[in-house]
Amino acid sequence: MVDLVFLQSVSYIAAAVGVCIAAIYYVLNLRTAIKTREAQLFMQVFDRFREQDFWEGINETRKAEFDEFLEWTQSKMSFDEFNKLNSISAYFEGVGVLLKRGYIDVGLINDFMPITIISYFENIKPYIQWRIDRSGSTYRWKNYQYLYRVVKDTHERRLKSYDKYLMTQNGE
């Protein structure tokens, strides 16, 4: 009789543990689903934000600002190039948001486009500096600045891990 009570108690405990494990699993899956959905919503908004047409519309209303930028930088940039600069910078700003929030891993970025991020940022530093000076705030393109610094800090270290897999100059 004691064995039956003991077995019954063990089965109740096992059932309770199973329910707890299922609840924990559900909560973890729910968190992942919420993060994924938030990233999807961000991308829907972001897709419009980075479109060149969007920036052409914005910059059309800020033509005087473009002229001021040309004067400040002594640039020969065309208005179309200025719109493209804003569009591409907006794209990298969005990638920086995804990196900062943990939706994308810096390793994935380093595998895919580190040189593009680093070289483009270094080429447009005068633009970013002009934006910072003009607004009086270092927060202009802050997520792109964050992306640039993190990628630059991690890229060289990451490359060294690939050395043993790459061909040498003699083709081996």
Image (tube, rainbow, N blue to C red):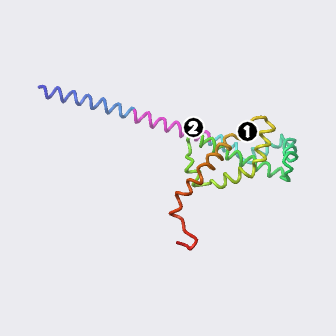
53 sits to left or right of 168: right
Choose top left, top right, bottom left or bottom right for residue 93.
top right
7 magenta-colored: no
Q: What stretch is highlighted in magenta?
A: 24-42
Question: Dot 1, how many residues are within 10 Å of its Cα: few (below 14), some (14-19), or many (20+)?
Answer: some
* Relative depth, front residue between 46 and 93: 93
Q: In this view, does 76 lie to the left or right of 122?
A: right
Horizontal and vertical percent position of residue 36: 53, 40
The residue sitting at 35% across, 31% down in the picture is 20
Q: State the image quarter where residue 136 is shown.
A: top right
The label on residue 4 is: none
In the rendered view, tell whether residue 79 sits above or below residue 134: below
x and y, in percent, of residue 120 in the image: 71, 52
Residue hosting label 2: 38
Residue tagged 1: 140
Up-down relation of residue 51 to residue 29 (above or below)? below
Residue shown at 84% from the left, 48% from the top: 73
Q: Position of residue 5 (x, y in %)?
A: 17, 26
Indicate left or right for 97 with 19 as reference. Answer: right
Residue, far bottom:
170
| Tally of marks | 2
Q: What residue type is labelled 2?
A: Glu
Which of the pair 142/87 is nearer the observer?
142
- Quadrant location of the N terminus? top left
Q: What residue type is labelled 1?
A: Arg
**Disc 2 crowd, CA 10 A, few/some/many (<14, 14-19, 20+):** few
